[in-house]
Image: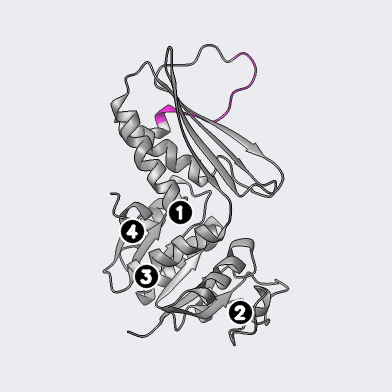
Amino acid sequence: MSDMRLAVVGAAGRMGRMLIQTIAETDGCVLCGASERAGSDAIGRDAGAIAGLPALGVAIVDDPRVAIDAAEAVIDFTAPEATKAVARLCAERGIAHVIGTTGLTAEDLAALRAAAGGCCIVQSGNMSMGVNLLASLARKVASALGPDFDVEVLEMHHRNKVDAPSGTALLLGQAAAEGRGVELVEKAVRSRDGHTGARKPGDIGFATLRGGSVVGEHSVIFAGPAERIELRHVAEDRKLFASGAIQAAFWSRGRPPGFHSMADVLGLS
C-alpha cells in the first residue's frame, strides 16, 4: 500500500510543527499539504523548514482547500472556528479529519458530528494512549465508588494555553460523569471563589493551573471520608500527541463516514 497522504492545518503552530516533524519520521505516511491562517509569516515557506527539517517540497498556503486537495486525511490542532470550517471541507471531499483542537463547545461538537455525515472524523481532547487509558480507568473507578467519594480534576499547562479547563480535563470529567451515569454539564464546577458554601454531593470539580513550559499534567482525584484515590498522567513531550494523531489517521483510512474518538482508535470504547 502506498504511503498515506496527510495534510496539516495550523502548520506553523506549536503542534503543527511537531506534527510535520513526526510525519517525516513515521513510516507509511507523507506530508502532502500544509496551511496557516491568512497573514501568517509562514505563508509561502517550506513546511519542513518551518519545522526545523530539510525542505520537504510542501509550501505552506493560506487556503486550507488547497492544502487538503491531495490528502487522504487532515490533522487539525487549531481553533474551534477554523476546525469547523475544515470539517465542512473534509465532508465535501470525503477526506478523514483528525481533530485535536480544544476549547470546543457543545455547539461546536454538534457541528462536527454533522460534518461526520460526509467523512470519518476522529476527535479527542487528547490524542495520547496514556490519557485515554486514564479516562477509561476514571470511568470504571467512578462507577465502582459510591456517592461518598468526591471527584476533582486537576490540570496544569504552559503559560500560553488559551482555554481552560483543558480539553483533556473535560475528557476526564466526562469519563467520570459517564461512570456515575450523570450529565457532566449538570454536575461540573469550574470555579470557586469567595464564600461558596459546602461542596454539593455529586459535583465534579475542575481546578486549573497555568505556568512555565508544562506540556500537560492531569489528575483525577476521588476523595472519600477516610481515603483518597488519585489517577495521574504527566505528558513530557508533545510528540506523543502528534504520534497519537497520526495513529488515528492510519485508523481512519478507508473507514466510512462517522464520528469517533481516540477510545475507538485504541479499542477502549
Name the amino acid type tagged 3: Phe
**Which residue: 44% across, 78% down?**
29
Residue 238 placement: quadrant: bottom right
**Which residue: 52% across, 39% down?**
218
Instruction: State the separation of the CA atoms marked 3 and 1.
Output: 15 Å
N-term mark: 2 or 1: 2
- Residue under pointer 2: 61
Name the amino acid type tagged 1: Ser
Name the amino acid type tagged 4: Val
Instruction: State the separation of the CA atoms marked 2 and 3.
Output: 24 Å
- Residue under pointer 1: 128
Q: Main secondary structure of the magenta part?
A: loop
N-term mark: 3 or 1: 1
N-term mark: 3 or 4: 3
Tell me the element at label 4.
helix
Residue 196 higher or lower than 33, as above or below: above
**Which residue: 42% across, 12% down?**
225
- Residue under pointer 3: 250
Q: Which residues are magenta?
A: 186-195
Q: Position of residue 13 (x, y in %)?
A: 64, 64
51 inside magenta stretch = no
